[in-house]
Image (tube, rainbow, N blue to C red):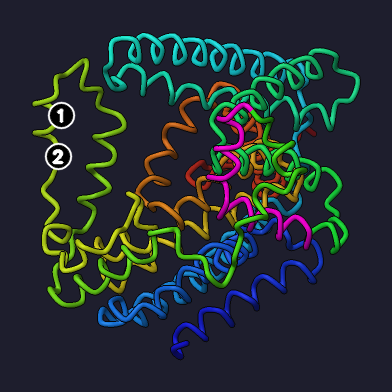
Amino acid sequence: MSASLYLMVAVSLFFALRGILGHNRLFEFPTLAALLYLAFFVPQALAAERNPLLRAYDPWALWFYMTVALVAIAFGFAIGKRGAFSQARGVPPPPIERRRLEIGAAALILIGLFAVYQVNSMAEAASARGTSWTGEITAWFLLLEMLFYGFAISWLGLLRVKNSTILKVLAAISFIFIVWMVNSNVKRTMIAEVAIILAGAWFFLKFKQPPKGVVLISCFLGTVLLHQVGDVRQFVNDKRGSVAEAVVEGVPFKNFRYFNSDSSPEIRQAIVDVYSVNRSGEIDGPASLWNRFVHQYVPSFLVGRQAKNDLMVEVRSSMNRDYRLEAFDFGGATRTGFSDSYMSYGSMGFMVFLVIGMLFGWLYGMSIKGRLWAQFYYLLLLNDGLLALTESTDRFFTALPYTFALTVLVVVPRLTRDLAKRRSKWRARRGQVRHFRPNQRRRPELPSAG
């Protein structure tokens, strides 16, 4: 191993062990990011350094950049967490409004279920015609996320309002459909999102870390599923059983090899991208982020494909990539968030991860101070934050407006009420100190009679 890879592994182990062995640090974003490094990136990095073709592209530059990115995440998380503590100091958490949680969860779950129905019916029609997915199907597929949002609200509320029958029914219905979706698609993102919501809500309620043995077993199982989810998907597609039955029968463990993992192409593509930027010196700025916004929020079936393409910005760095590795089978499309951030901002791309860490640190600080809205957003965005490392940082930032827009009616009234209470408290404190305005003259006292 190169010195930069040793450094990346050492820093990842430090943050991972700090979270597992420390006091209630397991669900902090730097801890989960470090565990993802060890489970997903390190095996690919070891395989890349054994490949003589990839060694010619200076992989040490990517290892060093990934190390700086992890440190930036931890540093930003500490800044955001400290800011949340100072902001919430002396302010009690607002009371939980059961009726608002029930109405909000019911609305999100109903829309999510309707989106599931629309996606299935349109996908079957497209399959019968022999055509690919249209933009309309993709739009409904994005609304399908509301089922997970409704499950998160109902589960968080159920753990705090135990006598709510409505929340129990909503949580059960949404969980049943989510399990059905997981067994139908067998995607790593869905499995991770369900696990995060279930375990994270319990953690914020008890604020107590699970036993270390349970944590280590969960980390090992997550690492195996992360690499061998294709075997589980094949098991389910062959009608041999469900995801749980595949795990019980040991399907993902049969072909798992941590130190010989060379099946994922993400790191290999990121090595070439970083090398190309260092060689050409050209960066794109926020061009790729803008293109991602246009791709996700401008529907071509409404404005037309040509109008949508005209809004796109030409990305130069991807055109200058060294394609001497075309003969090397990448076998995938994602390039990791280290690739797109480096192609956009060069060596200053670590600032992107600093911002992500600050956002999660602020939400985490508010969450452990009892803010239910912060717990809701922290759990929803946590999976997207990890995907910012494995897939794209642009994907994370473009998902933020979508997530907030779909949940604003449920969460924002609580925020505005909290701010109103702070404003009235500040005004009352200000009135105790100052009894008249600075530009207002005091009336002269009249002489007393007699």
Using the image as rendered, state which of residue 78 and residue 119 is in the foreground: 119
Above or below, 41 relative to 145: below
Classified by dominant secondary structure, the portion drawn in magenta counts as helix
Q: Is residue 233 part of the magenta span, yes or no?
A: yes
Asked if marks 2 and 1 touch (Cβ < 8 Å), the reply is yes
Q: Which residues are magenta?
A: 216-239
Q: Quadrant of residue 198 in the image?
A: top right
Residue at position x 69%, y 42% in the image: 195
Amino acid type at mark 1: Lys
Tag 1's secondary structure?
helix
Q: Is residue 262 part of the magenta span, yes or no?
A: no
**Residue 385: x %, y % from top left:** 51, 51
Q: Residues within 10 Å of mark 2 (few under 14, many from 20)?
A: some
**Residue 28: x %, y % from top left:** 66, 59
Residue at position x 44%, y 62% in the image: 353
Using the image as rendered, state which of residue 311 and residue 212 is in the foreground: 212
Q: Residue furthest right?
A: 163
Tag 2's secondary structure?
loop
In the visual, does 83 lie left or right of 397? right
| Alpha carbons under labels 2 and 1: distance apart | 7 Å
Count of number-bearing discs:
2
**Residue 86: x %, y % from top left:** 66, 58
**Residue 8: x %, y % from top left:** 51, 79
Residue 444 visible at all? no
In the visual, does 179 lie left or right of 22? left
Q: Which mark is residue 290?
A: none
Q: Quadrant of residue 445 in the image?
A: top right
Q: Which mark is residue 312?
A: 2
Q: Which mark is residue 308?
A: 1
